[in-house]
Image: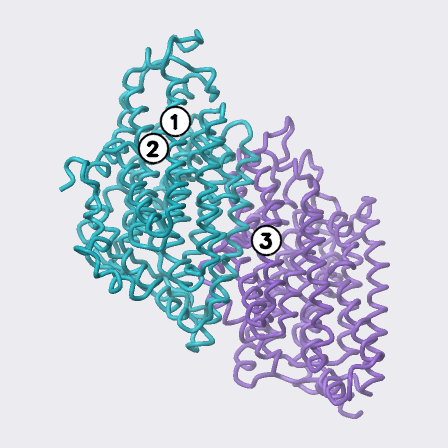
Chain colours: A cyan, B purple
Amino acid sequence: MSEHILSIIWLTPLVGMIAVMCLPKESKDLIRYVANGFAVLGLLVTIPMIRAFDSSNGDFQLVERHDWIPALGAQYYLGVDGFGYLMILLTVVVGWLSILCSWSSIQERVKEYYAFFLFLQAGMLGVFMVLDVFLFYVFWEIMLVPMYFIIGIWGGGRRLYAAIKFFLYTLAGSVLMLLGILKLYFDHFEQFGHYSFALEDLLRVAAYTGPDTQFWLFWAFFIAFAVKVPMFPFHTWLPDAHTEAPTAGSVILAGILLKMGLYGLVRFAMPLFPKGATDELTVQLVALLSIVGIIYGALVSLMQSDWKRLVAYSSVSHLGFCTLGLIALNPNGIAGGMLQGVNHGLSTPLLFLAVGIVYDQRHTREIADYGGLANRMPVYTVLFAISLFASMGMPGLNGFIGEFTILRGAYEVSIWWAGFAVLGIVLGAAYLLWLFQRVMLGPITNPKNENVKDMNLREIIVMAPLVAGCFWIGLYPKPCFEILEAPTNKLVERLDPGYFSRNAAEPADESVQLSRLLPAETPASE
Amino acid sequence: MMDAISFTLSDFHVLKPAIVLCLFGCGILLTDAFLVRRIGQRWLNAVTALVGEAVVAAVLLQYLPDVRSAGSLTGLGGSIVVDGFGVFFNIIFMLAAALAVILSARYMEAEGEQRGEYYALILFAQAGMSIMATGHDLVVLFVALETMALSFYVMVGFLRDSKRSNEAAMKYLILGAFSSGLLAYGFSVLYGISGSTSLAAIGEAIADRPALDWIMILALITTSVGLFFKIAAAPFHMWAPDVYEGAPTPTTAYVSVASKAASFALMIRLFVTAYGSVAEAWVPLLAIVAVATMTIGNLAAVTQSNLKRLLAYSSVAHAGYMLLGLVAFSATGLRGIAIYLLAYVFMNFGAFALIAALRRDGEAAEELDDLNGLFGRAPGYTILMAIFMLSLTGIPPLAGFYGKYYIFLALLGEGYYILAVFAALYVAVSAYYYFRVIRACWLGEAAERPASLDMNLGTRTALVASGVLTVLIGILPQRFIDLAGESVLAALR
């Protein structure tokens, strides 16, 4: 059982998809129960993984390995380390919630909807656990297809445009990555005389290739991941896709899909091409694009009159922090970047869910159509405020921990990086608080808002785990840092051999012990 | 000369597929005239043709162990060599012909042109292709090519009452004859250079020549252009959209898959065996043509509103990818072409099978808009259509991916990075028009009088089998890759 646990995790939603496809399309409620059942089951089957996972071990765990296509050297090769482990947990939780939150908002083509959603879930889980680059590419591509349909069929007014734009952007990035993969695979063959796509085999190639090759290969991978993250200037698909997607689609896009870009960077692009990732030009360029993304995303968010689009652009800004952290190439930056990825995966879905709740009642996303909702929706107001604060980086909530760690990492590299990032935080507070003021506070100016209903129990259940997660990471981030520590240290050591021995002179292994990074003023940090 | 006249058992052995096909073709003509027409059940001709395909399949299976142990079987004084390459391509022709027969049974009935001659022509064309893949002699190859082409000219114009079908046939005939003329001219120059019609002897003669002179370039260009016409490579692709649109849909599928495969077989044979020593001369030429072909095919397909035209341009684009496999001129590249063609049989036939079945009030419905809302009426087949389109795009893990995979790998292995980037980015362009088809099926609003699928058991089987194989080759490609690899090694030997 335990040696197949990862397979079981990604196959559970796939079995769910087949089960949903076998049901008659008229019995909508039955389909909903079955789909939700499989979503909960998907959550439960991770329990053995949680029990078996050892966060002090930096190697891949729960490994499963079989030959798949011997002619190519492609294997069915699964395993997790801290990065993948956190992402899998995030995926099963956010995936479950997005399936739950679709209960009443999806009324048409229910069967296909849940089938696609479960298919998407299987694909995303696969991405986070494969250790064979060929299989990774398969999961990476295949997952675009259900997302295309989810946006295209159940999305808003410009859904067709948004869906194909999403697809083409990501595909264009991925095929470049495919070329990078094949080149690497070919180089491996030249060096070692046998074909293999296994990550550990390909990692050995880096010692034999020069900085130029690694630079180009890094960028071939990087563009694919940068489109997904999305990083300025590859972000233009995001506002359309997020805005037009149905609520659950936006939740999945923001919560999980964007994280694939980050995950791809730390799992593949950076360790496979250490000389490419640490190249001066790469570092400066990525940092510049991240900072531009942070500021630009925030400024554009300030200008939005569409609520959902505002949240979408805020993702560009927030993900800029994550990539800035990663490219700082030090333990604080990388762990902070990945943690902030998780944080964004908790808080942005909350914001999208909040939009969805009022959108289902009023069918408008214009901020100007709202105002004074706090008078009618007290529970909603509280939860929305918590989401905003989490997103904004309020101490005590998760966003703060992530941003703080990233800032530390960035500061170690350059005070300018940290300075610009702080400006981004200020702007972030501005657009989020201003949004809150415009939709929640003041008197009700639009009579249509007189009759809005507060959240029902299901909606509260959907939001509660995410809110709990925000508080948990905000108040007690130690477990997350512990999980991230081993793989982060391994990655840093690979990128910059001798990093830890050089910095060992610093007092009390501060930079190694990420779990001690907590700011002193945060309560319950011990 | 005495050798060539006496016909031995081994000569018979290497010609078996062609002989079987011709016999069954003539048999269909005879039984149709004297028997089937009387009973009025003319779909029985299709059954006869399928029996013929089964016999061909048996012959090919019989070849396999011999070819594996002996390397190749030679007959007719070296004019025909059955090797792994020939058998592999014959398998492709056999699959394509069988699928064409199955689809035609329903389609020609609905069009009111159900006749025996049509099925006989399918088999005759296949006989020509069979020898195109095994021939090693210019004269034999040319006769085989013309056997295929003449059969296709008639099949394309088989809908006698349809103006478009007639126009397509006329266009195909004139341009096809022109290209055959060029090819024949090129062959004559090759004969002049070497004094032999055998490919191996020509190859040696070319290798022994001191340098690349104008006469060699003349031979190279005329033969290449002749073949570019046949595979519909730009700028000689103009016939393809019109012919694909006008021809009966099963014929379109057959032409697009089998004629392309056969022409590639001839092309690989000619370029590897005869022109192998002057690769530096034709590689740039092919590279330019390949990029032009991908560009024109992909960009023109984007704006098409007719499904058959869209797939015609898509097929032009695919020819560009396959040419890149030849540009790389390595075992990997040729394996890519072989895998690509095998996958192409299933994904392309699958797509055409669905279009062939699409009808509104008995009229063939071939516009993109006719697919609108098809999901509501036939969800299962729409899923298959999506699979074919994704496979044509090259999304893993579907069959079409592996062709592109090997071709990219070959390009990178030989250091053609820019070409690889071009080819890769055109995948994203092609996704746009393949997704127009998917979008119409899944997201389009059904019209007032929607087109529906008119199927019989055969069409259903063909569709499902194509879909299953597209997925199967994708998920478990090992056997198919091995088969293609063996075939290519034989060609390079």
Q: Which chain letter goes with mark 3?
A: B
Residue drawn 29% across the image and 58% down it: A79
Q: Can residue A70 be seen at all in this image of the molecule?
A: yes
Q: Residues within 10 Å of mark 1 (few under 14, many from 20)?
A: many
| Whole-number angstrom distance, CA of label 3 to CA of label 2 | 37 Å
Q: Please, is residue A18 above or below residue B216 in the view?
A: above
Q: Which mark is residue A285?
A: none
Q: Please, is residue B204 above or below residue B450 in the view?
A: below
CB atoms of marks 2 and 1 within 8 Å: yes
| Whole-number angstrom distance, CA of label 3 to CA of label 1 | 40 Å
Q: What residue sits right under mark 3 in the picture?
A: B427
Q: Which chain letter goes with mark 1?
A: A
Camera-side residue: B217 or B450?
B217
Q: Position of residue B184 (x, y in %)?
A: 83, 73
Q: Which chain letter goes with mark 2?
A: A
CB atoms of marks 3 and 2 within 8 Å: no
Q: Amino acid under label 1?
A: Leu
Residue drawn 34% across the image and 32% down it: A392
Q: Position of residue A14 (x, y in %)?
A: 36, 46
**Residue A58, picture quadrant:** bottom left
Q: What residue sits right under mark 2 in the picture?
A: A391
Q: Count the numbered circles shown.
A: 3
User: What secondary structure is found at the residue carrying circle 3?
Assistant: helix
Q: Amino acid under label 2?
A: Ser
Same subunit, labels 2 and 1: the answer reads yes
Q: Tell us which disc is closer to us: 3 or 1.
A: 1
Q: Quadrant of the C terminus of chain A?
A: top left
Q: What residue sits right under mark 1 in the picture?
A: A432
Q: Quadrant of the N terminus of chain A?
A: bottom left
